[in-house]
Image: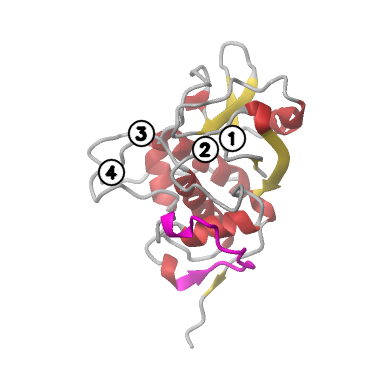
Amino acid sequence: VVTFHSDAQDGVAFYAKDKKTGVVGVYWVNSGHENAKPASGSSWASADLRQADELGLIPECLEGTDLTAPITRAEFAAVAVKTYEALTNSAAIPAANNPFRDTKDADVLKAYRIGAVNGTSDTTFAPNALLNREQAATMLTRVFKKVSLAGWTLQADGDFSLAYAKPVPFADDADISGWAKDSVYFMAANGIIQGSGGKFMPRSGTCMAAKASSSSSSLSSAPAAKKKVPS
């Protein structure tokens, strides 16, 4: 079980740990360079952060790093892998053939093999590019599909559907990429990554700890997806 917190304004966060101090804190999905410091003293997060640490959901790549820095695609790939391993109780294996010429990161290759991530092209992953909200929603939804749907692969994604009641469209629905829309609304419907003020802000993620709400949701609590039945 992994819990993600949504800010009352416009943010999404996950867990990080300082290797030197052992302090567990919040690491924000952020494309605006406004990040929170580790929230070890924040009462709204402390219990879930401790649980995440105890369950081993904090990737090694985030230990000992600057927890106020933005998160990259490679770092969130590691989060996706940890989530997959926790939900399946099995170790992810790196892809045998690396299609990316810009990274050899083991967690990226694990995430690629389970179908949690794709490249920015056939041969690039852009590991150091900052992650945005629609990318985070898509990666987590793919993890959910891999765990809950027998036979699901990223290549066969179109053969499967998600069982959820779609929320009212966000005011900035037109700004959400087509490949991310189903994941965005699935996450929003289950309270995992939500919008604010009627907007989702797909390409941003700025958030400060002081504004963070206590709303949270477990990825594993989402209803099961299903394979599409030909009509």
Q: Which stretch did the figure color magenta?
A: 159-175
Amino acid type indicated by mark 1: Phe
Residue 43, compared with residue 177, is above or below; it is above
Q: Looking at the image, do the residues carrying marks 1 and 2 touch, with CB atoms under 8 Å apart?
A: yes
Asked whether, in this view, residue 148 is left or right of residue 41, the answer is left
* Residue identified by numbered label 1: 14
Secondary structure type for disc 2: helix
- What crowding class fits label 4: few (fewer than 14 Cα within 10 Å), some (14-19), or many (20 or more)? some
**Which of labels 1 and 2 is toward the front?**
1
Secondary structure type for disc 4: loop
* Residue identified by numbered label 4: 98
| Res. 130 image quadrant | top left
What is the C-alpha distance between the residues marked 4 and 1?
A: 27 Å
* Between discs 1 and 3, the one toward the N terminus: 1
Could you tell me residue 180's position as x and y percent?
Answer: 44, 57
Residue 98, compared with residue 152, is above or below; it is above
**Residue 62 sits inside the magenta stretch:** no
* Between discs 4 and 3, the one toward the N terminus: 4
Could you tell me residue 92's position as x and y percent?
Answer: 48, 44
* Residue identified by numbered label 3: 105
Residue 209, compared with residue 182, is above or below; it is above
Residue depicted at x 62% and y 32%:
56
- What crowding class fits label 3: few (fewer than 14 Cα within 10 Å), some (14-19), or many (20 or more)? some
Amino acid type indicated by mark 2: Val
What is the C-alpha distance between the residues marked 3 and 2?
A: 13 Å
Badge number at residue 79: 2
Q: Quadrant of the N terminus?
A: top right
